[in-house]
Amino acid sequence: MFDFVIAGVQAPIALLMFVGFTVGIVGGFIGVGGGYMVTPALIVFGFPGYMASGIDMTHIAGKGLVSTLRHRQLGNIDWTLALTMVAGTMLGVELGVRTLVYFKKAGTAGIVLLVTSVVVMFTLFLYTQIETRRSHRQMKLLATQGRDPGRELHTSSLPKFFQSINLLPIVRCRTARVVVSMWVIVLVGAVTGFLAGFLGVGGGFIRVPALVYLVGASTHIAVGTDLVEIVFSGGYGALRHSIEGHVDMMAVLFMISGALFGAQLGSIATAYVRGPAIRYVLSYSLILATLGAAMRLIYVLSGQKNEWLSLIAVMLTLGEMIFLCLFIISLLYFARRNRRGEWVPDWVKPLVIT
Amino acid sequence: MTTPTTDTLEKAKGGGIMKWVLNSMWAYWFLLLGVSLGCAAAIYLIWLKGTM
């Protein structure tokens, strides 16, 4: 146990490093900050809510930078897309925060936040899961015909619609190989920013599917590009929380020491898999986070009487981090076996790059 | 000398329940989820039970 003087709590160092490591892998692989996993975990460890947000945000900024640098080396960042989207994101976050203040004044913020989280995450899970399974089947079919499915395949028809909007100026995103109206990117940034600002999260789990299914970027590019946004938003959030005195730097230090390794491993793992593998992990992350939020919602609605509901929510939060981490590491392991020509399960073959 | 994991995979090629678990995405998913929730329960019992 380490005595965190600023936060005024005692927590095990190994656990903080472990959380940093697991969320680092997940963040580097699916391009999210992981605030929806880390903040509840830190609260469970005994940190006050405001301190948990501050520590989380500061660690996300550091970890996001490491992942971004690694994804830059892998050629997964489209700077035009990232910087155009920042404008819309800022506007959306501001609107989201104002809406949240409105519900706070009405005294319904807690329940509205939980209900919105459950609805948004479950909808994203359903769409991502159904589409990814369709892509997976198509990749299997291509593989049986002896054709190389390439690094990316998605079956959504939404990008074609959004790319057909001819509203000037038209932006050419060279790395993402997307030609689309600037207003579409700004609108996507604004909508995802609104949800992020309203829900009080970084919004990576909303932006990555939006970049893939609305803008038409490949999953790898969506992950790398979203991490750029996370560095901006995390850096600003870290600064604001530090000024308010919401950051215990020792806790951040322990978490980042784990996250540095995790973020690199997660980012490198993307080079071994095809787009649908990343989207599968993203959808699993969404459904487990949905279940955790649903448990908390039922706990709140039942007048906070059933303690076992709160306990299940804790188990799901911790279990989710471990599950996603194990899934990514096993995919990496299978991908390496596949490259060596060794046996791997049939469902893995279309998901990994040979 | 092979590692235990490699050994398990080698056996899975032959058949049996391990092959079924590894070859079915959902079965593998539930196996990992079970292991993860078990680890989460262990973390709770070792570190968090008294603090919550």
Image: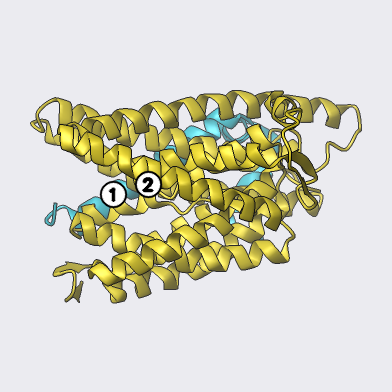
Chain colours: A yellow, B cyan
Task: Specify the quadrant that holds the N terminus of chain A.
Answer: bottom left
Under circle 2, the secondary element is helix
Q: Is residue A95 above or below residue A76?
A: above
> How many C-alpha atoms fall within 10 Å of the one at disc 1: few (<14), some, or many (≥20)?
many
Check disc 2 and report the residue beneath it.
A36
Q: Is residue A58 above or below residue A181?
A: below
Expressed as whole percent of the image width and height from the top left, the position of residue A284 reads 50, 36
Under circle 1, the secondary element is helix
Which residue occupies the foreground of this view, A103 or A10?
A103
- Relative placement, left or right, of A296 versus A8 is right
Subunit that carries the residue with mark 2: A
Expressed as whole percent of the image width and height from the top left, the position of residue A43 reads 22, 54
For residue A40, the mark is 1
Which residue occupies the foreground of this view, A354 or A124?
A124
Q: What is the distance, in whole Å, between disc 1 and disc 2 at their CAs?
A: 7 Å
**Residue type, label 2:** Tyr
Subunit that carries the residue with mark 1: A
Q: Name which residue lies at 16% across and 26% down.
A: A301
Q: Are marks 1 and 2 on the same chain?
A: yes
